[in-house]
């Protein structure tokens, strides 16, 4: 069985060296969809009975590990020196330094890497992170698969 839940957040970024307008500082209302696989839990008289994982627990983990970290932050590539130096002049600015250029593809891959270890199987139901889908706009997204 597969389950998917979706969260949204706002963040700024730029793609240095982009051939068009994405080299400018700008922001998106991102959406992230988390897909897990596992057996349906059959544990009578428990809150999780009939679920792969409670959606609220799926979301709580994603918020804690990724969404709250990236929300209202500026995501900057670690080698984008001009922007990084500028952001470092702003007191208490929420800046997230990315190891890769913060494209939808790299953000999906980074979220997958962070979240993979966070979804732990507590009922022996073979819980597994299958996919992270990262929407940069309503029309464009990237999938990171396990
Ligand atoms: N493969 C990728 N291509 C592009 C990415 C990306 O992450 N992966 N990112 C960008 C820019 O960040 C840009 O902000 C988004 O580009 P675009 O889709 O052209 O933006 P629109 O606002 O025009 O999107 P609509 O869906 O048409 O509203 C560029 N390319
Ligand atoms: Zn963009």
Image (spheres, rainbow, N blue to C red):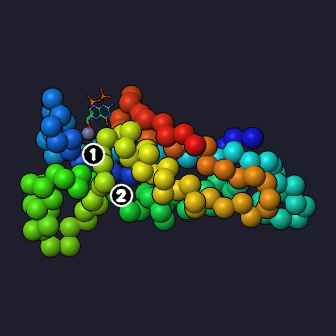
Indicate the secondary structure of the residue bearing disc 1. Answer: loop
Q: Residue 2 location, x and y as percent?
A: 69, 41
Image quadrant of ligand 1? top left
Residue under the point 20% across and 73% down: 92
Residue 56 visible in the displayed image: no
Q: Residues within 10 Å of mark 2 (few under 14, many from 20)?
A: some
Please give the count of numbered marks on the rendered protein: 2
- Quadrant that contains the C terminus: top right
Examine the rendered structure and indicate whether residue 37 appears above or below residue 99: above
Q: Residue 118 location, x and y as percent?
A: 58, 61
Q: Residue furthest right?
A: 44
Cβ atoms under marks 1 and 2 closer than 8 Å: no
> How far is the residue under mark 1 from the one under mark 2?
15 Å
Residue under the point 54% across and 39% down: 145
The residue that disc 1 covers is 101
Q: Residues within 10 Å of mark 1 (few under 14, many from 20)?
A: many
First in sequence: mark 1 vs mark 2? 2
User: Which of the labelled discs sits on residue 144, or is there none?
Assistant: none
Residue under the point 10% across and 62% down: 85
The residue that disc 2 covers is 70
């Amino acid at each position: 069985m597969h389950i998917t839940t979706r969260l949204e957040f706002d963040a700024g970024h730029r793609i240095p060296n982009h051939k068009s307008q994405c080299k400018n500082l700008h922001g998106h209302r991102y959406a992230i969809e988390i897909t897990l696989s596992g057996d349906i839990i059959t544990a009578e008289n428990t809150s999780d009975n009939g679920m792969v994982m409670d959606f609220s627990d799926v979301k709580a983990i994603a918020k804690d590990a990724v969404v709250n970290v990236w929300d209202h932050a500026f995501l900057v590539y670690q080698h984008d020196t001009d922007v990084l130096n500028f952001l470092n002049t702003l007191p208490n600015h929420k800046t997230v330094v990315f190891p890769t250029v913060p494209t939808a593809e790299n953000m999906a891959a980074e979220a997958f890497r962070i979240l993979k270890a966070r979804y732990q199987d507590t009922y022996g139901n073979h819980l597994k992170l299958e996919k992270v889908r990262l929407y940069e706009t309503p029309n464009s997204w990237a999938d990171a698969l396990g």
